[in-house]
Image (tube, rainbow, N blue to C red):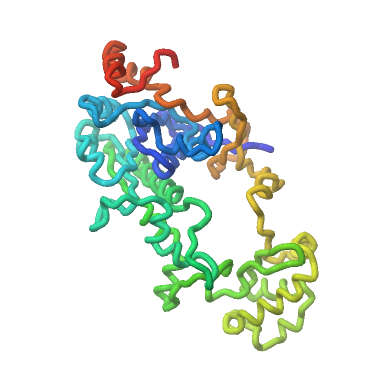
């Protein structure tokens, strides 16, 4: 397997990440994967995702969102500590903060505060409900925002309660959009020499990711729970049972519909006026799926996939994560990277950045996530603080600064 190579495109960029959980750290990790130096600012108790453990192993959530970073640990509520962050921001290129609107402002760490001391700084905010509107200061987790954004109402079986998407797509989606904003402003800064401010939120990301859903709505189709169906306007495009499981098929385009009928040896469906066009199939959806199921349940998923692959039918198995991590094609893409850590006493894998630049070449494994406050002393010494000043802060509990790092 040839792992993908992301050159140190952002090797001269320093990022401060004042964020916990998934959204902000995911944004920071993307920038770190692209070569930036990412300094994670954590409270004395650490990013709360460190505690999401079900065993004595490192929290999988923290492990998955915090590679290639350094960690400093400080208490923003202690007098003098916000000034430490401002000093670090004066030397940084990017500042990511993912707290509710108003928190950074009250600490003196708003975009206006930091841009005044570093006009080249790119300031990025991520929140639950966004920086504008009457709910801007509402707390918002991924589950809450999946509900509020309409995702949950449109997810699940028609006769079952609403369901969340099985991954925190609001968190990761907003992290990606935030990274896009940061990269755009870094590009603009190359021309203007001036930084800028970008913000996004879980709500905005989730609405944006439903672009086709809202397109249907503006076209007069009110979304509703469809189970595995892709939409009300495309048939067949959903999971269909086989002898030993299910297949996902998406054959609503004329050519794909013809390929499917040929592959399952049902030419009668092609000639049936009830199914001749996509519109006909939409109107007779239930009957068509019943007829397809009666044929597909005669063979196993793997048997059908052999036929479909040979004839180019747009179909695929419904894999579990167990299937995905052992799938030869997925492995060939180099999506999973080994992360070996003697310090953490565990070997594991992480999901790599899904971008390939200039082809694929060998490159070093990702750096393991930092221990809490592991780099506090190093980073602050670089910023001009003396060991005595750092020790004084540490003595008050306002800072976690190991002597040996």
User: From where the camera sits, is residue 380 visible?
Assistant: yes
The percent position of residue 384, horizontal first and vertical second, equals 28, 17
Identify which residue is drawn at 34% across, 46% down: 126
Q: Is residue 333 above or below residue 57?
A: below
The quadrant holding residue 244 is bottom right
Q: Toward the viewer: 391 or 365?
A: 391
Q: Is residue 57 above or below residue 226?
A: above
Q: Residue furthest bottom?
A: 273
- Where the C terminus falls, by quadrant? top left
Identify which residue is drawn at 74% across, 76% down: 294
Say left or right for 143 vs 362. Answer: left
The percent position of residue 351, horizontal first and vertical second, equals 56, 41
Q: Is residue 404 above or below residue 323?
A: above
Identify which residue is drawn at 43% across, 49% down: 171
Say left or right for 287 vs 155. Answer: right
Say left or right for 360 vs 207. Answer: right
The percent position of residue 254, horizontal first and vertical second, equals 64, 76
The quadrant holding residue 57 is top right
Q: Toward the viewer: 312 or 382?
A: 382
Q: Toward the viewer: 8 or 272?
A: 272
Q: Toward the viewer: 308 or 138?
A: 138
Q: Residue furthest front?
A: 55
Say left or right for 325 vs 45. Answer: right
Identify which residue is drawn at 31% across, 42% down: 99
């Amino acid at each position: 397997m040839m792992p993908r190579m992301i050159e140190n495109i952002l090797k001269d960029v320093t990022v401060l990440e004042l964020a916990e959980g998934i959204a902000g750290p995911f944004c920071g990790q993307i920038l770190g994967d692209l070569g930036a130096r990412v300094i994670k600012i954590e409270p004395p108790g650490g990013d709360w995702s460190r505690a999401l453990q079900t065993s004595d192993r490192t929290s999988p959530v923290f492990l998955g969102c915090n590679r290639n970073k350094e960690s400093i640990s400080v208490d923003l509520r202690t007098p003098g500590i916000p000034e430490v962050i401002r000093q670090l921001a004066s030397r940084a290129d990017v500042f990511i903060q993912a707290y509710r609107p108003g928190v950074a402002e009250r600490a003196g760490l708003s975009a206006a505060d930091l841009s005044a001391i570093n006009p080249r700084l790119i300031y990025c905010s991520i929140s639950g409900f966004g920086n504008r509107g009457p709910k801007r200061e509402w707390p918002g987790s991924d589950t809450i925002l999946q509900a509020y954004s309409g995702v949950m109402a449109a997810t699940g079986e028609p006769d079952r309660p609403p369901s969340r998407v099985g991954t925190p797509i609001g968190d990761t989606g907003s992290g990606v959009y935030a990274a896009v904003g940061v990269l755009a402003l870094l590009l603009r800064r190359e021309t203007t020499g001036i930084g800028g401010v970008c913000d996004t939120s879980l709500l905005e990301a989730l609405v944006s990711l439903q672009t086709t859903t809202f397109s249907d709505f503006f076209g007069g189709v009110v979304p509703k729970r469809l189970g595995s169906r892709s939409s009300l306007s495309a048939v067949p495009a959903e999971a269909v049972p086989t002898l030993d499981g299910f297949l996902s098929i998406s054959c609503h385009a004329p050519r794909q519909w013809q390929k499917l009928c040929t592959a399952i040896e049902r030419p009668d469906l092609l000639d049936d006026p009830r199914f001749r066009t996509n519109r006909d199939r939409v109107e007779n959806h239930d009957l068509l799926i019943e007829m397809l199921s009666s044929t597909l349940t005669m063979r196993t998923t793997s048997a059908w996939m052999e036929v479909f692959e040979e004839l180019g039918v747009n179909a695929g198995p419904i894999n579990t994560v167990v299937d995905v991590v052992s799938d030869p094609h997925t492995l060939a893409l180099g999506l999973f990277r080994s992360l070996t850590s003697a310090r953490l006493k565990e070997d594991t894998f992480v999901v790599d950045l899904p971008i390939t630049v200039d082809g694929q070449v060998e490159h070093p494994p990702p750096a393991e996530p930092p221990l809490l406050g592991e780099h506090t002393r190093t980073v602050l010494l670089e910023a001009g603080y003396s060991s005595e000043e750092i020790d004084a802060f540490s003595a008050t509990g306002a800072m976690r600064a190991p002597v040996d790092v």
